Image (cartoon, grey):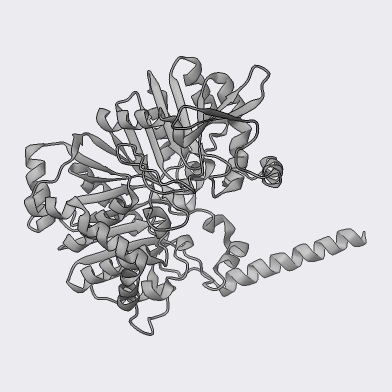
Amino acid sequence: MRLIRNCLIVAAVIALAVIGLRWAFPLPQKNISEVVTKQAADWSGPLGATIKNALDRNPGLDGVRPLGNGRAAFAARAILAKEATTSIDAQYYIWQDDVTGLMLLDELRAAAERGVRVRLLVDDNGISGLDELLAELNALPYAQVRIFNPFTLRNPKLLSYAFDFGRLNRRMHNKSMTVDGVATIVGGRNIGDIYFDYGAGTHYLDVDAIAIGPIVDEVSQSFDAYWNSASSYDADLFLAPPIEQSLKARAEAARQSAVGAGYQKAIRDNELTDRIAARDLKFDWSDVTLFVDDPAKGLGQVQREDLIVEQLIAFAEDSKSSLDLVSAYFIPGARGAEVLEGLAKSGVKVRVLTNSLDATDVMPVHAAYMRYRDGLLNSGVELLELRALRQEHSERSLPEMLAGSASGLHAKVFGSDGERIFIGSYNLDPRSARLNTEMGLLIESPAIAASLASQLSKPEFSYRVELDDEGQMLWLQEDKDGSVTVHFADPETSGFLRALTAVVRWLPVEWML
């Protein structure tokens, strides 16, 4: 009886604490001061004039350029911001307080100070350390910052999960940047050094696409929906007014650093600037479709049939000959596994590239993925696990997409039948399916899709996972000289890590990974 009574007392104390914190740190009654929508496309500026020239030669089609090299992806964003004349609309899950984060945030500041309307929507889970700089940007007359699903307790922010977990567990995972209403960048990259692949240390293999044409207006409409959604809040409701103007100085210091100098060189060397000046941008021309979740998903108010996951399942099930999936975090779930195994059994060549245990940065995700490996392999699905390339400098591409010195996969790219390819923010896991909002572009391009397929056929960057005749799992490592090494456990991992992963594998947490 005493144990039961003590448990009830503890439960009551916890409940009172949660109620008290909810009362002490409530959400504002009104989330935004006004509804703001996109501006008309500007075809008179240098960027608009160049793109108009290209569109006139390809009426009704969308132009796409994959961005796989991290330095090129950074440079494209910086150049577009520099060329902007009327508007920049950017939304990101993570914006880091580091060299590239400061440099790109300062490009938004510079644009706003020359009269470009800047709207920046950031998820509050990914802006650690940036409150003061975001407040500084937000204070500019031509700039506005909004925060998606904000933490009402700013310090320590994570304590907010204790009293508002249901809401805060849903995040905005979208990544896009649209300039002058004429060009947009959509894909898997957040803003930060680790995503732009330069200098020493760990980096991610990732993929974006820069797009022009009718698809840009669709991305702009989607941005408006998020910008004015019930989950977006004016930044000044949570961020204190800036004490001093430090963004420009901090960004200049970042540019003068050794790493920053490399990024400055990437901007100078990028062909976009010359192509814009010459009005001669090169694109792959096709039909492009925007896949995007309704922002109401951030509040759990979207029906299952309206989720982006349903569109991607239909995309997979339409495959006739091949399906290639590149996903940093891969947990197919019962339904996804059934779809992939069914396709493989029907004769479709299904290949999946994800991180190895050594390469992943989220071990619990890999633990959950392990539950599905045997079933997928037995059905004929080919599993490839990226090797941690810490000691190598690789220049590999998914048509110049997966490139750079890296140790982990972050890309989310899916190809079907060598004809269509999806590039976006969506991971093949329960969190992307049910909790986070996501977006991406479905591109009808045999050239880009075929490049993805050809890159997955190169064995030297991944382990091929197989089952031997007795059901023992093997990892085959093929090097450039053709030699093959067979591993009988997750390669380059310790016994302790494998044991810990085995324990996590059985925990009931897959739904939130």
Q: In the rendered view, does 409 fall on the left or right side of 467?
A: left
Q: Quadrant of the N terminus?
A: bottom right
State the image coordinates of residue 352 (x, y, percent, origin top left). Answer: 47, 31
Residue 251 in sight here: yes
Nearer to the camera, 422 or 199: 199
Task: Specify the quadrant of the image occupied by residue 358.
Answer: top right
Nearer to the camera, 54 or 396: 396
State the image coordinates of residue 443 (x, y, percent, origin top left). Answer: 28, 35
Please tell me whether residue 101 is drawn above or below residue 154 in the rendered image. above
Nearer to the camera, 247 or 93: 247
Residue 138 in sight here: no
Q: In the rendered view, does 156 fall on the left or right side of 274?
A: right
Most extreme residue toward the bottom, as rendered?
243
Determine the residue positioned at 52% across, 45% down: 431
Task: Specify the quadrant of the image occupied by residue 42.
Answer: bottom left
The number of numbered discs placed on residues in the rendered structure image is 0
State the image coordinates of residue 207 (x, y, percent, origin top left). Answer: 35, 44
Most extreme residue toward the right, as rendered?
1
Nearer to the camera, 302 or 115: 115
Task: Specify the quadrant of the image occupied by residue 74.
Answer: bottom left
Please tell me whether residue 267 is drawn above or below residue 315 in the rendered image. below
State the image coordinates of residue 108 (x, y, percent, origin top left). Answer: 27, 67
Q: In the rendered view, does 460 fall on the left or right side of 262?
A: right
